[in-house]
Amino acid sequence: MKRNSIIAMGICVLAIIALGCSKTLKDYGFTQKLDNTYAFLKINYESNYSNNRTVWFKINNQRVGGPITARSPFPGGGFNTGGTSTADVISVTPGSTKLSVVLLHKIDNGLDSLELYSTNFQLDAGKTYIAHITDTAANTKSVLTQENVALPDTNYARFHFLNLMPNVPAVDIYYGTVATTVADQKSDSLMVSNLGYLKNSGDIKFKINGANGIWKIRAAGAPRINNTIASYTSTSVPLSQRVFCGFALGYSGKTTTAQKPYISFLLVR
């Protein structure tokens, strides 16, 4: 009987160990390894309607993600935006790619209530892109940027900037430490000059020195005084060995949260 009891106890112990081990296993369902046979895309949706309507994105007529509002780049969010702050992207089959912004019916029946905007991009395998969408209704426009995802050196960050402000033909982008309320801001450093609407600045290598300062937007050619259109400061922008896409958005002169000007950033890598 004693020998049988020991055997029974041993079986119970083995069963408990097996049960404990099984808890560490997770079923992720169907998974697929991503490689350079795919293109990679992030959507920077900045169509700033006054009612900040909720929209869905479709790629090649298939819904991706969930409901989203303007100023919430998908996927991954950004800085001075909605969402999180990661460098997430969507994997897309290379080639001609249709991107649509749609409204759903109040009770979702699987069909679109209204297509707000649609465009086509040519995406190449192994490349990373951001599709930037701005303005509203019939004035909606988009621009595609191909991203340089190579990491900068230690103590450096890399930026490029876009002007997505429909009613500001060109902007200057500054970086400094002087508060936006101070009359004399001549110490601000000009990062990008005369950046036209829907234009991309190209890459800027940024040396990180000390505490982070203040990013500022001014109308192109405006003096460095307390006349900023928008400003932003963050301990996360810049960071060493990070790649950012900065952008001016919104409408100069508007004051509501949904439509006022911002300077915001996406984390590319």
Image: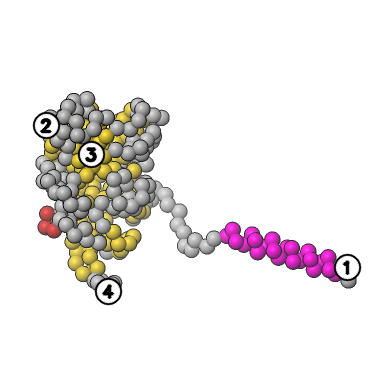
Q: Is residue 8 above or below residue 159?
A: below
Relative placement, left or right, of 112 versus 74 is: left
Helix, strand or loop for disc 4: loop
In front: label 2 or label 3: 3
Spatial CA span between label 1 and label 2: 94 Å
Residue that badge 3 annotates: 231
The mark nearer the N terminus, 1 or 2, is: 1
Residue that badge 1 annotates: 2
> Label 1: few (<14), some or many (≥20) within 10 Å?
few
In front: label 1 or label 3: 3
Q: Residue at x 26, y 57 (%)?
A: 69
Specify how the rendered protein is coloured. Answer: secondary structure
Helix, strand or loop for disc 3: strand
Dot label at residue 107? 4
Of 118 and 94, the residue lying toward us: 118
Residue 236, horizontal then vertical, whole percent: 36, 39
Identified by mark 2, the residue type is Gly
Spatial CA span between label 2 and label 4: 50 Å
The magenta stretch is 3-25
* Residue 23 is a magenta residue: yes
Q: Residue at x 24, y 71 (%)?
A: 105
The mark nearer the N terminus, 2 or 4, is: 4
Q: Residue at x 12, y 54 (%)?
A: 139
Relative placement, left or right, of 230 versus 32 is: left
